[in-house]
Image (cartoon, rainbow, N blue to C red):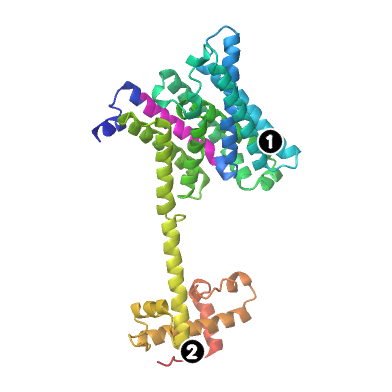
Amino acid sequence: MAAFLDALTLQAGYNAALVAIGAALLGFAAGTAGTFLFLRKRALVSDAVAHATLPGVGIAFLVMVALGGEGRSLLGLLVGSAISAWVGLLLVDWIARRTRLAEDAAIGAVLSVFFGFGVVLLTVIQTLDRGRQAGLEDFLLGSTAGMLMQDAQIIAIGGALVVALIWMLRRPMTLVSFDAGYAATMGVDTRRIDLAMMALVMAVTVIGLKLVGLILIVALLIIPAVTARFWTNRVELVLWTAGAIGGLSGFVGAALSASAPDLPTGPIIVLIAAGFFALSLILAPARGVLAAGLAHRRFQARVHRRQGLLALVRGEPIHDPLTLRILRAEGVIRADGVATDKGRALAAKIARDERRWDVARRVHQDTSLTGRYDGLTPIEEVFTADQIADFDARLGPPQPVAG
């Protein structure tokens, strides 16, 4: 525990601090970049982008070796992966627009072909003398613990540029994400905005390849955005919340890995992000499972209470155990099922409200008001006191409910 706290407070050494800061920066950039792709319902594109980087890594290595270099230049490998990913993106876009195939089919085809080609290239490279020492397999699952200052600088500069571009393009991206047709009528070039979204995701994927690998970077792009969506409906809040969750996942995951060196950093970061997702899935106040369950229980109780009160109005026996339990708990009926004075008053009120709604539907042809009748919404929330007094005048005096 002490080692974990030291890592959290950046007291676990230079390399651990560098990895934690780099992972946090990458997590923040990935969380923000993946938000609009998730809102656009194109999360699978990030998977295609990540897998399409692998051939570029292999080709870049072979080109650098052919030109007389060692082939291990990180910048050269990242440029190769970026070119390869961009070609993959254009192929997905072309197949989806120019053929009868749906986008998910195009993504599946490009993802599998590019990844297969990349694995073949890496296998060939491993047979070369220089290839055995290249460490290109780190691009598959990442090599966070081996992060250098150069890697952290690339992540910091690249991530800052990506976040700045997202901030500048947030309005057209929001329009295209929610209603591409309306955005087109407003003069927004939806295809270019789509390509911009995918290019930003590609940029984060490329700069994060060395840290978490092409397989796990997809999780950092999508999980923070999905998690943030549980907590808010406002796009800008989703954007920054996703960035914060991604950054926190990267920082805590790297700190945990530093305190337990046998644990792989990249997968730990993803598991931390998944933990935030699970907590949000359960505890989020509006969209969480717990909130939905409580809302369902409240709705169920209101329905049973209303049905019980209507049964009292009609003098019908109540047999449903849940209805009896709710009415007894509220003091509407006694233990033997006979209505109390409070129960008779509430029953008379609900019976009169039903008759008021009948009058309202005859008097008001405006369905925006009378259409709100669902049996559970109090009539006082729809009509004013003067309007309800008018309904009462048409109905005559209230009728008592028998006990």
Left or right position of 95 against 391: right
Q: Give the image quarter of residue 1.
A: top left
Q: Residues within 10 Å of mark 2 (few under 14, many from 20)?
A: few
- Tell me which secondary structure the magenta stretch mostly adopts: helix
- Residue 63 appears in view: yes
Who's the residue at 48% across and 15% down the image?
A: 133
The one nearer the camera, 66 or 340, is: 66
Q: Which mark is residue 191?
A: none
In the depicted structure, whether residue 151 falls above or below residue 364: above
Q: Residues within 10 Å of mark 1 (few under 14, many from 20)?
A: some
Q: Residue furthest front?
A: 127
The residue range painted magenta reads 18-35
Tag 2: amino acid: Arg
The one nearer the camera, 197 or 61, is: 61
Who's the residue at 66% across and 27% down the image?
A: 87
In the depicted structure, whether residue 290 falls above or below residue 95: below
**Looking at the image, is mark 1 or mark 2 nearer the viewer?**
1
Tag 1: amino acid: Asp
User: Pointers 1 and 2 in contact (CB under 8 A)?
Assistant: no
Who's the residue at 42% across and 59% down the image?
A: 291
Distance in Å between CA atoms under marks 1 and 2: 64 Å
Indicate yes or no whether the magenta region holds residue 142.
no
Secondary structure type for disc 1: helix
Identify the residue under disc 1.
93
Q: Give the image quarter of residue 83.
A: top right
The one nearer the camera, 156 or 97, is: 97
Indicate yes or no whether the magenta region holds residue 26.
yes
Identify the residue under disc 2.
314
